[in-house]
Amino acid sequence: MKEQHKKESPILSLLGMGGGGTGNAFGGVPAPETGTQANPFTLIANAYAAGVSNGLHYFQNANVNSGTAFQMRYATYDSRGWVEMLWSTDDDRSTPWDAWLDYQGGSRPYLQDYNLSNGGINYGANASAVIKLHTDFNIVDVAFTSKSSVAGDGLTATGQNQGSILPLVASNDLAGTQASQARQAMADFFEGSGSGISIGGNQGGTPTEDYAAYWSKTGNGVTGPFEMHLGFREGLKSTEEFHIADGNTSPGSTYAPNIGYRDVVGSYGGANVGSWTSDSSAKNVTYTLGTSNVLSIWISDSLT
């Protein structure tokens, strides 16, 4: 049984009891949530329970967008619901630090909203966008994939996908003795409530990682372990590494990212998605972010 530390999967409520649906049916009883602007979803699980199609739907929470309904891109995958919280076509290696991260005077970054439209992610302008949600959404899982267009729906990879590795799902593809703790810390970060983390094969050893966990998924003849360093690496602030999955299986060695950003000149640097190799050279340019190879990050409030 997978350990779950902070949150439990929400009790489904089609009557809007998770945060304030606006519609009313009879005598003040909230109308069923349908994902419209008048009757938005208050939980991702409610969208899944309603059986809505992949695409843009309205959501509402008192702590997001001043309580006004906003749109998010929803998808069903692995028998549960997900929403997209970040997309990027930006191959500028400094993008996370220029646009997404706020260190708040400390050594670990937090996500910040970037490029929103009417409270939701903007899909029509700029080269990336991020939305912060709230702990009310009870996020417990994160998935990473590639898309062939910014407006693409779903978690199935349509951009580059070496060895069919994507989507990379934290609850399915993390290994190590602290995989469940790492998954929840990752979920907190991409929800917008937690700080950046550093995970690899060691915890309390050398190199020092927050959790003894790592990516372990077989594709292209490579299984891992691959590490994650989200603007923080092995106890220190990092303004050059935002590895979702690093590029080398040797513990403590990262090189150019398979997925993510590294802001250095030369072969160690890159802005990639869809690669899955272990080496000390630059990743193939095929995997560089662009309008036909979009980094796409999704979050879910369910593990089952």
Image (tube, rainbow, N blue to C red):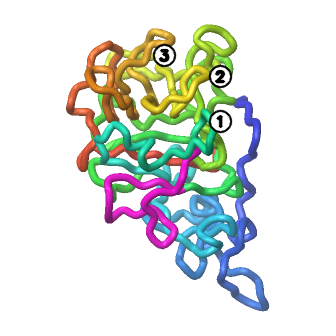
**Alpha carbon of mark 3 to alpha carbon of mark 2: how far?**
13 Å
Q: Nearer the viewer, residue 281 or 153?
A: 281
**Dividing the image into 4 quarters, which one contains the N terminus?**
top right
Q: Identify the residue at the far left of this view.
A: 285
Relative vertical location of residue 191 with respect to residue 68 in this rendering, above or below:
above
Q: Identify the residue at the far right of this view.
A: 27
| Residue 79 in view of the camera | no
Residue mark closest to the camera, 3 vs 2:
2
Residue at disc 1, secondary structure: helix
Q: Position of residue 250 (x, y in %)?
A: 45, 9
Disc 3 marks a residue whose amino acid type is Pro
Q: Residue at x 60, y 35 (%)?
A: 108
* Mark linked to residue 225: 3
Mark 3 or mark 2, earlier in chain: 2
Q: Are marks 1 and 2 in contact (CB under 8 Å)?
A: yes
**Label 2 crowd (10 A; few <14 / some 14-19 / many >=20):** many
Residue that label 2 marks: 211
| Residue 78 in view of the camera | yes
